[in-house]
Image (spheres, rainbow, N blue to C red):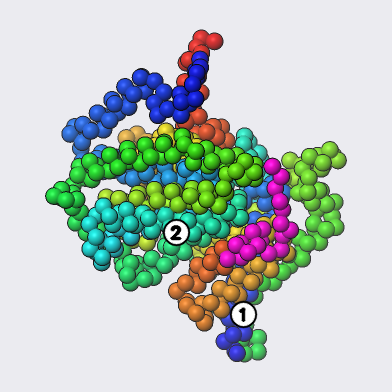
Amino acid sequence: MDLKQHYYEDVSLFSSATIVFWFTALALFLALFPLVVKNYYIYLANYIAINIIIVLGLNLLVGFTGQISLGHAGFVAIGAYGTIILMTKVHLPFLPALLAAALIAALFGFLLGLPALRLEGPYLSIATLGFGLTITQIIGRMDLFGGREGLHAPALTIGAWHLDTDVDFYYLLIPLTGLLTLAARNLTRTQVGRAFIAIRDADIAAETMGVNLLYYKTLAFSVSAFYAGIGGGMYAFVLRFVEPEIFTLMMSIMFLAMVVVGGLGSIMGAIAGATLLSWLDLQLRNILDIPYLGDWLTALSQSYFSITGVSNIQFIVFGMIMILIMLFEPLGIYGIWLRTKIYWRTWPF
Amino acid sequence: MLDFLQMILSGIAVGSSYALMGMAMVLIYKTSEVPNFAQGEMGLLCAYFTYMLLDGFGVALEIAIPLTLAVAFALGAVLEFAVLRRAKNPSVLSMIVITIGMEMVLLGLVSWKFGADQKTLPFPISPYDSVALGDIYISSLELLTLGIALMLMIGLFIFLRTTRLGMAMKATQQNFNAAKLMGIRTHRIMMLTWGISAVVGCIAALLIAPTIMHPYMMWDPLLKGFAAAVMGGMTSLPGAIAAAYLLGIIENLFGGYVSIEFKAVVAFAIIVLILCVKPSGLFARHYVKKV
């Protein structure tokens, strides 16, 4: 079926011409997309792109390296606040500010990676969870960060390009997402990515085979935090406003859910999971406007539940998705895709 | 000095609810190695169930409380049977994700049914009365929490040490397969453990509900209880209890002497520091994994 005859076929970026064709088609579609759709869908695409960036980073950490992080909202917050403050207080231009904020996030990732060297399972999850909560508390209590009121994003210009509409952000975000996806893909098919996978499968065995745990585990945390920092910086501008209430534990859980639903340890899975759950997130916020289902839910809420709490259905939906994926398809959407592909390739046998 | 004693006493009172949550989590973690993030929301559901019985149906408190405890037991057992046991790939990460999923479903159900606003549980002991012990004060609800927590700890201790069922639970914890070979119905033991743990969590929630009652009320106790359980070593009941009281006291002293603003997060800073030094917590033997 998939006979590989050379080592380089195993690590090549595109395995066949068909895939190159489909990626070109996707790139063309993404380039022309804003010309044909309403503004809301461009906002939706931006929101999805940001989540893809963050989830790619988280997947490098959780899916490839096997470390748990329940504090990723903390890194996103550092990226968001860092970019705004570097632009307004230090007067850096946008791109250096974004990069610097992401590097600050990566530094925090490195620091969090140090205790993670000795921790695993529930111990690691409580340490990262504590990190995320602490960052939100500190941001909410310090005047530099605007306290509870939050901060407004400044006007955004890159050279002579003034970005003020969603379409402008779209044309900044999509190439950025593509670039970061390519970077993540490249990382996973080099020595570094293999070291990550070795650590995930058995860290002690990896260490005896010569994988430097100190280096690679902290690297995984830093890279993951860097992605979250970039995502956070863009998040601040797409929302145009940040406040500590955004970066809660629930946000970290949502990112983890995206990773798990998409598929642990797969780049395409991260993209699929982020796309599906971000879309669902925005759809479920006004669930009562959905035709038929909305009316039925209104009636159900009025007779058995309360109409004021109906937006909480999104928690039920996300929770059910997480449970069902874990119970029936631990590899997520990517696993479903793999099985479908194999089924059709060997069909009718 | 008086301030100091008062802070310690309040710390002990707060620590009791952390201890209850920590105990509930340790019970589950010991038998099934699942860090149960749904513990808080299981309690939340039970607290709102009591609220519904008392406020909506006018059931007497003496009937409502035992009924709630029975529901809590059933909820825990059913969740173990229907969800956790079905997991194909019981790695720590997938267990964490499943319990977080259950947490979200329960949270969504409760807030869909009751809305996000603050409710008041009609409880006979008001959180605003206080009892004087010499010159320091403790509210009567806190005193009740402390008393119930102590009673539960002693009760669980005796139960696990002396009864047949307790012994069977311990055997299951130590070696699942060997216990099965000895004729212990290990799956049933798991269900029972989840049930008992849900009851402990439910008691914690019922004791918190008179003071604050909204859908997110269990997040702080859950996280602090989890932090205490981790600090105590995740597998040691006395460890979790000691760590919970320690956390409560440190938190209050930190709030009193250093900064009231960062009181809520000091627990996590301490946790990270302690875990850096003792990666398996304060009271557990360090377990070295084989390749």
Q: Residue at x 52, y 48 (%)?
A: A216
Chain letter of the residue beneath label 1 in the structure image: B
Which of A101 and A272 lies nearest the eye of the viewer? A101
Point out residue A98 in the picture as x, y percentages from the top left corner: 30, 54
Please say if B64 is above or below A257: below
Q: Is residue A328 visible?
A: yes
Q: Which residue is mark 1?
A: B8
Instruction: Measuring from the top left, give residue B263's x and y in whole percent.
Output: 50, 72
Residue B78 visible within the image: no
Identify the magenta region.
Answer: B273-291
Three-letter amino acid code at disc 1?
Ile
Q: At numbered mark 1, what does the secondary structure look like: helix, strand or loop?
A: helix
- Is the C terminus of chain A in the top left, top right, bottom left or bottom right quadrant? top right
Q: In the rendered view, does A227 fall on the left or right side of A26?
A: right
B179 lies left or right of A7: right
Mark 2 residue crowding within 10 angstroms, few (<14) / some (14–19) / many (20+): some
Q: Residue at x 60, y 75 (%)?
A: B249
Q: Residue at x 62, y 34 (%)?
A: B88
Instruction: Find the distance from the CA under tag 1 to the CA under tag 2.
Output: 34 Å
Q: Nearer the viewer, residue B17 or A90?
A: A90
Residue holding disc 2: A108
Looking at the image, which residue sits at the far top? A348
Which of the two marks, 1 or 2, is nearer to us in this view? 2
Q: Is residue B277 magenta?
A: yes
Count of number-bearing discs: 2
Give x and y (percent) for residue A88. 24, 64
Q: What's the residue at 51%, 77% (across, down)? A: B255
Going by the picture, which residue comes out furthest to the front? A210
Q: Is residue B77 magenta?
A: no
Where is residue B183? Give x, y as percent: 85, 39
Mark 2: which secondary structure?
A: helix
